[in-house]
Amino acid sequence: MDFLLNGTSYGGGAAIGVAEGYKKGFVATFGEDFGRDFTAGSSLQIYRGETLVDQLSLKGTAAGMAMVRRCLAAIRADKSAAQREKQRYAHIADDPFAVKQTEMEKLQFGVNSAKPRSLPAAWVSDADYPSAAQRERRQGVTGYKLEVNADGQATSCIVTSSSGHPDLDEAACRLIPRRARFSTGGLYESKVTWRLPE
């Protein structure tokens, strides 16, 4: 394929035929010289040997290419600014409050890595029953999960399954971290059954 642009012939490059529905065409690659001449050109003729394949007017090409260059320059500037901003805060973790992957896996699969030093059933007694819930004869089961530090103390408690009564859930997560002691750090998951005496 030969490309005649403003009287200058460009050829020797590979051209690949393409088709979409009833439309047909080809794709070719060129060097930088062609791009500059194409921007300033007025017409383009394409030959295959002696046969004219197509003839195109390049009116408005210069303005179009100028707009493309402005867009590309703006994109490059935005990317550079974003990179500079990222480097400016590179010393700060992306998410300082993110749970470590190993802990996330334990949370996901419910692994009890923290070992209690006392009987978990003794952490909450009948005397801890919230008075309003006792008067209203409310019962339920609160599921909870503790995060335990290296000293064996619970540093956080979350409700994993509600009893259906906020005051019972709140009492569980308020009392258990105060009373629970562990021989190892990690995570611990269990339940409290709130049951009134018969």
Image: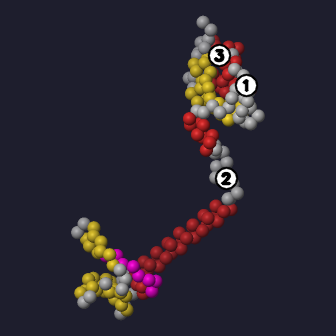
Name the amino acid type tagged 2. Answer: Ala
Q: CA distance from mark 1 to mark 3?
A: 32 Å
In the picture of the structure, the residue carrying the numbered disc 2 is 93
Foreground pick, 135 / 108: 108
Local SS, label 1: loop
Task: Locate residue 47, reporting x and y percent.
Answer: 28, 86
Per the model, the C-alpha gap separating discs 2 and 3 is: 45 Å
Amino acid marked by disc 1: Arg
Q: Position of residue 98 (x, y in %)?
A: 64, 45
Q: Is residue 53 left or right of residue 137?
A: left
| Residue annotated with mark 3 | 132
Q: Label 3 neighbourhood size at 10 Å, few (<14), some (14-19), many (20+)? A: few
| Residue nearer the viewer, 133 or 24 | 24
Residue type marked 3? Ala
Instruction: Specify start and end residues of the magenta stretch as a single range.
Output: 26-33
Q: Quadrant of the C terminus?
A: top right
Taking the spot 24% from the left edge, 87% from the top edge, the residue there is 51
Instruction: Name the residue nearer the viewer: 80 or 192.
Output: 192
Count of labels shown?
3
Q: Which residue is mark 1?
A: 117
